[in-house]
Amino acid sequence: MIHIIITAYGEPKSTEKAVKAFLNQNIKQDYDIIVCDPFEEVKNFITEKFKDYPQVKYYEDPGEGKAYALNLLINQYYSDNKDDIFIFTDGDVYVNEKSVNAILKSFEDKEVGAVTTKIVSLNPRNNMLGYWSHLLIDGANKTRNYFSKRKEFFECSGYLFAIKNGILKEFPEKASEDAVIPALMWKKGYKIAYVNDAEVFVMSPSKIKEWLDQKKRNIKGHESLNKVVKWEGAPPRTKSFVNEIKFGSLHALTYPRNLKEVFWTFVLFYYRLKLWYITMYDLKFKKEDYKDGWREEENLTTTRLEE
């Protein structure tokens, strides 16, 4: 059984698109699609739109954060059968037509416990933040592919990743789920795989403030992994300031196609340094821990899929 869990937040039209992207696939195994959202209007919308599809279910998010909701769902649908799979994604993204089968193929390797996928930016490249989204996303894909081929640990993308059932019943909520879940799978002796054929299409922020808020929260979620992953032989973090310089600098410097993009690249360097400074100051001096707030503030940019 495949459990496809879509965590959403008051975006019925984009969530509908996310659901349809799975229904349109040739999935040969039994599966269900569970939409997890806290809003009554989304429940009514999804229930009505997919009333003829019994595999589409609605789960009311209790509003305690994404990790809290995922823990409830993992526990509810837990199975001892390791051929069962959890696929996690969001309601404001959608996947390509062969994503599920590509993910399942990776799990044919019994050593693989978690699978992450290729991110594709929907933003136009002809403006600065759109260009940033392509540069950063392509760099992340390249880095994950590098670690996957070397069979080394790396952290997944929360936009679309999957794990075997029957291994975890819950995970700590003090770090990003796409960081802590792979670490726990690694602890259990399983490998992480990157699948290039499974694509997830993402709309990134197009305003600096939204971009900074999103990236700051992401860094905090992965920095907090240090507080959770404490066992002997714990895997090294892959999302860090040092690794960003090590793996990202050459990629960034060779990514521009013209002088305008060269300029945007150096502006990005400035903002990434500023971002890391602000985030580490918050963590070290203001003692602000990672908080799993599921979109506490409306992000008008990334809800454009609603249009």
Image (tube, rainbow, N blue to C red):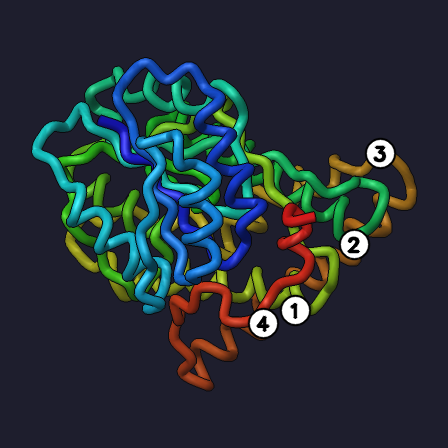
The numbered mark, 4 or 3, whose residue comes first in the sequence reads 3
With 204 as the anchor, is 116 left or right in this view? Answer: left
Residue drawn at (22%, 40%) of the image: 185
Q: Which residue is mark 1?
A: 274
Q: Which residue is mark 3?
A: 257
* Residue type, numbered disc 2: Phe
Label 4 and label 1: CA atoms lie apart by 5 Å
Residue on which disc 4 sits? 277
Alpha-carbon span between mark 4 and mark 3: 29 Å
Residue that appears at 49% across and 61% down? 219
Tell me where residue 210 appears, x and y as whole percent.
66, 65
Q: Nearer the viewer, residue 107 or 64?
A: 64
Kindly report the distance in space between the C-alpha atoms of the residues bearing marks 2 and 4.
17 Å
CB atoms of marks 4 and 1 within 8 Å: yes
Q: Position of residue 77 (x, y in %)?
A: 18, 42
Q: Does the image show residue 162?
A: no
| Precedes in sequence: disc 2 or disc 3 | 3
Q: Which of the two labelled residues, at mark 2 and mark 4, occupies the earlier sequence position?
A: 2
x and y percent of residue 21 in the render? 51, 29
First of labels 3, 1 by sequence position: 3
Determine the residue positioned at 28% across, 47% down. Answer: 181
Residue type pointed to by label 4:
Tyr
- Check disc 3 and give the amino acid type: Arg
In the picture shown, does residue 117 fall above or below 40?
A: above
